[in-house]
Image (cartoon, coloured by chain):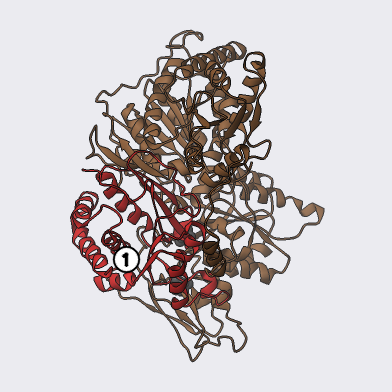
Chain colours: A red, B brown
């Protein structure tokens, strides 16, 4: 497939969330779409003990020419996709810069310390304010709520990918997504994924 | 989304480093693959097992790394290409056999793949396997991107056959668990037939016995092989220099660190000042190549993880050739240009290059940094814990209760698996485990502690051990404890699978890595057979477990075995299903008000239980709760109710 122009080379994407949210799957789908477009893509993943409640972060580097390091240098994210709100803040603290675009799913997953009443979880308004202040553009979604309406919270990750497509910063779209999903998944799951993607597209005005 | 049989030669696909390694082995015609699971290496055997086929490719999860290497070696001796896979510390386990294998040599191509974990992202050590290559005198290859991971693995078999010895390929977490573009090659159709030719003389490498004796003679032969490898490496395309003809600074690097180095130079805009020598063949180093490149400059920075392995080799070569190449200044680990512990990244590499060349690294605007400071500390820490419904939380709860009741200061010797979190994080296992070392060491340490009674030690001693760890290395320690009559309680936390690394099979499970039915080695029967007293229980039965433990602590001298059986909450048979529907009765929950001081949420800490700040009561989070029913047994007010869920 044709290699469309990137806004920056390498273009750096961070997808972040908590173990069990489908972070790895989201980064693989997005990266596979970009490989189809003819780019060289590197995904770096930090998912050591992630299934047990830890933060998970994928770094995606997209380039038309070279293989880049699986770790994005500090302060160099171009796009942040957060499946969980405080994870957005955590990532911006390390990788944020004045031109990063942020997409944030606002459904919190409370850390154990918050569950037990020892630590505080910031209010949604505080999170929005922080993300907006640290990003060039910020977009907040209720992807989990939409996904539950669709039948399973796990589709929140695909809703976020739909939103990424709509942002217009990467050469990916619904047709490409459908092609990748059809190849990588049993037919029974394709329909729900396409619906999730469409919801994400619609959520970004 | 991963590599499958449908993909063809010439396809450009996104592969994880471990999948690229597996693909390289397949393209080389590997016929036997064995390993022991361990992050970040497990996906290699998992990927190969999807391609397994009777008579074409045999894949196994062995009981431990030494057995995996022996299994692969047998195939090599019988004329089949083979590989064994392990994480860094697995090489320690296999090393005794490796020493002898390197001495005896191999026949068909055999490779050892090790995946190191710089930064200990999912390990309790930062051990390095590269040093084994030098110690055992075998060649070492390190891929620096995904395509190369495939090509190098494939070529490693050829090299192994050329020098008739095992070749080591070393990856790291940031290669193994990262993904990138790979263009696939062809899969060979031919399959070799297995036969061990052993009717020749000792000196016959084709038909003689495969042994490491006569030792001195074989050792000399082995060193000849290494010299041959060095000569081959002189021309290897895996070593490449890029940069100006006479760079101000030369970076010598390998593996993922090559990508960090490239990025550092690019961030500093220093491409016309810095050259990079990327080495793929990192032991033995090709001396002529090094001499040539070292001659081009005076300043050399070595970027590698974790210990100064390349750095020391390069310094030796430079010292030997100082007359010809002149005096050099070296930067790296020894002078502190780069940290000697922990993993590297582009920023650390950039800082080092910047300092040497006097370039200030680019920084964010002060206005943005001010904003960052304003929002610092907003995100609460996310500590790791056992999954909701994890049997380990219940087991440790009972152990903690039993030890408290006993009151003699007893403790747990921990081991490797999810249950190791009991020594690492407060939200997992209540800090009951007080030692944590190698696979099976909890039992060995307990055996030792259990003999200290004659010196006045009367603390009860408990060893915990998961099912996979039991087969891997705990059995000899347990036999020792029985034979020495050590006074210990050995608890097998049997959750029916290698949960930590993704449910690989082990000898306690009735299917193997290829998905075929296989005989089960029963933990209880084995413990009984070596003469230990065995009790089997369900960790979810809290009171019963606690009482059993107290009874065993008071009981007579010797080894007492308690097997706590309950499947992992993420096991395929349990995941997504709830046995009970849980509810907290607000009227009964005492909350902050009295007595329990929020025992359930503050101490027990299952993520399925929330503390509702408005109501000041505990509350079940229905999305997260796995419905195991255990918390009902810990609430002293009986406020947590459980009701059998309807079977769907
Ligand atoms: S994966 Fe299984 S054993 Fe590990 S913490 Fe989760 S429930 Fe427990
Ligand atoms: S029943 Fe209780 S202990 Fe079990 S998962 Fe739910 S909240 Fe946790």
Q: Chain of mark 1?
A: A
**Which residue was labeled with disc 1?**
A156
Q: Residue at x 39, y 24 (%)?
A: B155
User: Which x, y percent locates residue B371?
Assistant: 53, 67
Q: Which quadrant holds residue A204?
A: bottom left
Nearest the eye: B338 or A205 = A205
Q: Tell me the element at label 1.
A: helix
Taking B628 as reference, is B430 left or right? right
User: Which x, y percent locates residue B134?
Assistant: 59, 25
Q: Is residue B72 above or below residue B413?
A: above
Q: Residue at x 80, y 52 (%)?
A: B454
Q: Is residue B232 above or below residue B494?
A: above
Q: Residue at x 52, y 65 (%)?
A: B382
Q: Cβ of disc 1 within 8 Å of ligand 1?
A: no
Taking A111 as reference, is B337 left or right? right
User: Which x, y percent locates residue B144?
Assistant: 45, 34
Which quadrant is the C terminus of chain B positioned in? bottom left
**Residue B57 in sight:** yes
Disc 1: CA contacts within 10 A as few (<14), some (14-19) or many (>=20): many
């Amino acid at each position: 497939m044709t290699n469309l122009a990137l806004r920056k080379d390498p273009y750096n994407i961070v997808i972040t969330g908590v173990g069990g949210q489908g972070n790895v799957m989201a980064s693989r789908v997005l990266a596979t779409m970009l490989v189809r477009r003819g780019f060289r893509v590197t995904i770096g993943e930090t998912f050591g003990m992630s299934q047990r409640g830890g933060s998970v972060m994928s770094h995606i580097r997209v380039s038309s020419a070279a293989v880049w390091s699986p770790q994005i240098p500090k302060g160099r994210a171009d796009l942040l996709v957060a499946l969980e709100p405080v994870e957005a803040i955590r990532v911006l603290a390390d990788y944020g810069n004045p031109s990063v675009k942020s997409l944030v799913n606002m459904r919190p997953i409370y850390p154990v310390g918050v569950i037990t009443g020892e630590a505080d979880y910031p209010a949604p308004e505080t999170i929005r304010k922080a993300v907006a202040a640290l990003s060039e553009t910020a977009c907040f979604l209720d992807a989990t709520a939409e996904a539950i309406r669709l039948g399973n919270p796990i589709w929140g990750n695909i809703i976020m990918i739909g939103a990424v497509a709509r942002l217009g910063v990467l050469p990916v779209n619904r047709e490409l997504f459908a092609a990748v999903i059809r190849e990588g998944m049993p037919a029974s799951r394709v329909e729900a994924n396409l619906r999730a993607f469409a919801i994400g597209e619609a959520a970004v005005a | 989304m991963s590599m499958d049989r449908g993909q063809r030669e010439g396809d450009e696909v996104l592969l994880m480093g471990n999948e690229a390694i597996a693909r390289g082995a397949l393209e080389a015609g590997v016929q036997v693959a064995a390993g022991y699971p361990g992050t970040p290496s497990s996906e290699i055997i998992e990927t190969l097992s999807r391609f397994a086929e009777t008579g074409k490719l045999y894949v196994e999860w062995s009981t431990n790394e030494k057995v995996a290497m022996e299994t692969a070696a047998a195939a090599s001796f019988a004329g089949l290409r083979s590989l064994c896979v392990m994480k860094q510390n697995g090489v320690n386990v296999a090393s005794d056999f490796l020493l002898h294998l390197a001495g005896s040599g191999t026949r068909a191509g055999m490779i050892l793949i090790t995946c190191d974990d710089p930064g200990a992202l999912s390990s309790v050590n930062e051990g390095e396997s590269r040093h084994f290559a030098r110690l055992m005198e075998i060649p070492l290859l390190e891929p620096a991107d995904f395509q190369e991971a495939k090509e190098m693995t494939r070529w490693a078999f050829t090299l192994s056959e050329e020098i008739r010895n095992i070749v080591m390929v070393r990856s790291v977490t940031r290669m193994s668990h990262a993904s990138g573009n790979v263009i696939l090659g062809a899969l060979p159709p031919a399959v070799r037939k297995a036969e061990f030719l052993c009717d020749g003389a000792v000196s016959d490498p084709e038909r003689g016995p495969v042994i490491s004796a006569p030792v001195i003679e074989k050792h000399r032969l082995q060193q000849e092989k290494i010299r041959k490898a060095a000569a081959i490496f002189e021309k290897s395309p895996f070593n490449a220099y890029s940069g100006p003809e006479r760079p101000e600074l030369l970076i010598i690097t390998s593996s993922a660190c090559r990508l960090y180095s490239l990025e550092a130079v690019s961030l500093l805009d220093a491409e016309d000042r810095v050259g990079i020598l990327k080495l793929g063949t990192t032991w033995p180093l090709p001396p002529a190549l090094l001499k040539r490149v070292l001659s081009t400059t005076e300043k050399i920075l070595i970027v590698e993880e974790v210990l100064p392995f390349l750095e020391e080799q390069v310094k030796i070569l430079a010292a030997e050739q100082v007359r010809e190449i002149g005096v050099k200044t070296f930067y790296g680990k020894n002078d502190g240009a780069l940290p000697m512990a922990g993993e590297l990244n582009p920023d650390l590499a950039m800082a080092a290059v910047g300092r040497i060349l006097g370039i200030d690294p680019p920084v964010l605007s002060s206005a943005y940094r001010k904003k960052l400071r304003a929002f610092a500390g907003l995100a609460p820490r996310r500590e790791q814990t056992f999954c909701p419904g994890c049997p380990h939380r219940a087991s440790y709860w009972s152990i903690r209760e039993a030890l408290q009741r006993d009151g003699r200061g007893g403790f747990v010797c921990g081991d490797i698996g999810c249950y190791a979190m009991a020594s690492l994080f407060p939200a997992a296992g209540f800090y009951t485990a007080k030692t944590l070392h190698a696979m099976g060491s909890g039992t060995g340490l307990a055996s030792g502690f259990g003999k200290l009674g004659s010196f006045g030690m009367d603390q009860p001693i408990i060893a915990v051990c998961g099912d996979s760890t039991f087969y891997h290395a705990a059995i000899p320690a347990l036999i020792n404890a029985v034979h020495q009559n050590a006074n210990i309680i050995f608890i097998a936390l049997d959750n029916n699978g290698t949960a930590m690394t993704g449910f690989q099979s082990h000898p306690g499970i009735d299917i193997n890595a290829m998905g075929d039915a296989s005989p089960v080695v029963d933990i209880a029967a084995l413990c009984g057979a070596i003469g230990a007293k065995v009790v089997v229980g369900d960790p979810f039965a809290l009171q019963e477990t606690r009482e059993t433990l107290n009874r065993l602590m008071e009981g007579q001298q010797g080894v007492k075995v308690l097997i706590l059986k309950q499947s992992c909450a993420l096991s395929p048979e349990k995941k997504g299903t709830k046995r009970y529907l849980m509810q907290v009765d607000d009227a009964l929950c005492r909350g902050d008000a009295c007595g329990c001081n929020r025992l359930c949420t503050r101490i027990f800490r299952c993520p399925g239980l929330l503390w509702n700040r408005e109501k000041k009561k505990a509350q079940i989070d229905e999305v997260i709760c796995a419905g195991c029913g255990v918390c009902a047994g810990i609430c002293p007010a009986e406020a947590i109710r459980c009701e059998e869920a309807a079977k769907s």
